[in-house]
Amino acid sequence: MKRIVILGAGESGAGAAILAQKQGLDVFVSDMGTIKPEYQALLNEHHIPFESGHHTEALILKADEVIKSPGISLNAPLIQKLMAQHTPILSEIEFAARYTDAKMICITGSNGKTTTTSLIFDMLYRAGLNVGLAGNIGNSLALQVAQEQHDYYVIELSSFQLDNMYDFRADIAILLNITPDHLDRYDFQFQNYVNAKFRITQNQTPQQAFIYWSEDPVINREIARIHPQATLYPFGTNEHNVAYTDGKNMFVAADKQVEPLQIGLEQLALRGKHNQLNSMAASIAAQILHINNDVIRESLMQFAGVSHRLQYVATVKGVRYINDSKATNVNSCWYALESMTTPTVLILGGKDKGNDYSEIDDLVREKCHTLVFMGLHNEKLHEHFDRFGLRIIDTHSLQDAVRACYEAAHDGDTVLLSPCCASFDLFRSYEDRGDQFMAEVSKL
């Protein structure tokens, strides 16, 4: 019997364990940390053996295949040992895809993944399709394949998940943008990160679709270098694209069998230039799947957005508070600042991933009068921003950061939590950081 070892017992690991067991495989789960009670209960319910708090190498190194949590670095010593003995290491997505014939709509990019994934899911759901939401959001793909069997899956893919995908083929692959992120996981080599992102189009043929932002110089360079085999569907700001905007309207013409979709930009529920790009990408995917333009238009006008991404929290004494905790890289913060229309107090800080803050220099100078640093180590932020001449306040907790913003902001200002950094110095996740921010604002 084939032996499958699963490293990491979170959402993806627990789901992969249940699917592996259903396929009649010998399954063992190992997690170096503490397994959440709900996942322990799931494994116990299915009588799947597991360990937590340590890895028993003798049990793990006997695996025929290993399914690795995306949070575990390829440089981890145990992973290196597995690689040295040529044990196949794959992602939960790759494993789950073996056992379903469903159409896979896959989305990646440095920014906008969650919004675009959620918007596509909304369009397909409104159209009455049997669709599941998986990857970085939604439930485990493997668990859904084991227990639900949808006809379509809309999957948000991080670079970490793509690292361990080899035979997987996306029916529709979407690449929104590429800017430096997670460089600490890629030996601080941007090209390594770019290579990971482009794995989303590997194995595609002309029968599959590759949707991409045509004005991203990194994407254009790589397309010219590797020549993807999929049918290309570019979007951007000129009429040579399959979808484009003219400053007033958005046009989408991916399905040649129907009239192009036209919708006024002011009608879009999601505001800001970055969300126009997300909306174009989602609409192209929906048209490729022959979803009616009226359904697409309805979704574009009514979709409410996602939590922790430019999420309005409250207005306190004339000051708007915006939760953009999902901005875990500099480019994401750039988009948030670009959408600000009032003087801004900006909260920055967290676990630095090799960030180059110069990308937001002009917007910080133009939009912000106060910067609030929140983290255990703010030295790099000071090194970069102290020369700007802005008011800078150091804090080391979210409670202190919100209080500092409250005292620094004036009537008509916006307080923006858009940290540029990962959350793991002070918080369990960016969701935890955003939830705590909203809770502290509610106390003001």
Image: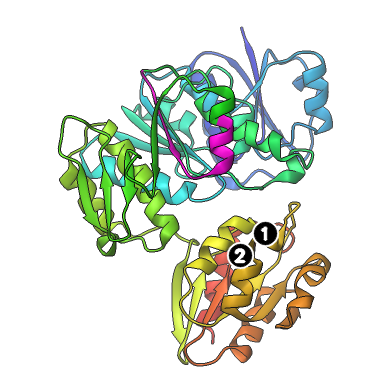
Q: Residue 423 has which mark?
A: 1
- Visible residue check, residue 120: no
Q: Residue 139 has which mark?
A: none
Residue at coordinates 84% horizontally, 30% vertically from top-left?
A: 77
Q: CA distance from mark 2 to mark 1?
A: 7 Å
Q: Looking at the image, which is closer to me, 320 or 423?
A: 320
Do the numbered discs 2 and 1 sit on residues whose CB atoms are within 8 Å? yes
Q: To which residue does mark 2 refer?
A: 433
Q: Looking at the image, which is closer to me, 320 or 148?
A: 320
Q: Residues within 10 Å of mark 1 (few under 14, many from 20)?
A: many
In the rendered image, the quadrant that contains the C terminus is bottom right
Quadrant of residue 370 within the rendered picture = bottom right
Please tell me which of labels 2 and 1 falls first in the chain.
1
Q: Secondary structure at mark 2?
A: helix
Residue 210: in magenta span: yes
Q: Write the start and end of the magenta stretch as one range.
A: 207-222
The vertical placement of 117 against 408, above or below, is above
Q: Amino acid at mark 1?
A: Ser
Q: Position of residue 398 (x, y in %)?
A: 66, 74
Q: Residues within 10 Å of mark 2 (few under 14, many from 20)?
A: many
Q: Position of residue 156 (x, y in %)?
A: 48, 40
Q: Position of residue 343 (x, y in %)?
A: 53, 83
Q: Secondary structure at mark 1?
A: loop
Q: Is residue 74 left or right of residue 281?
A: right
Q: Is residue 242 left or right of residue 182?
A: left
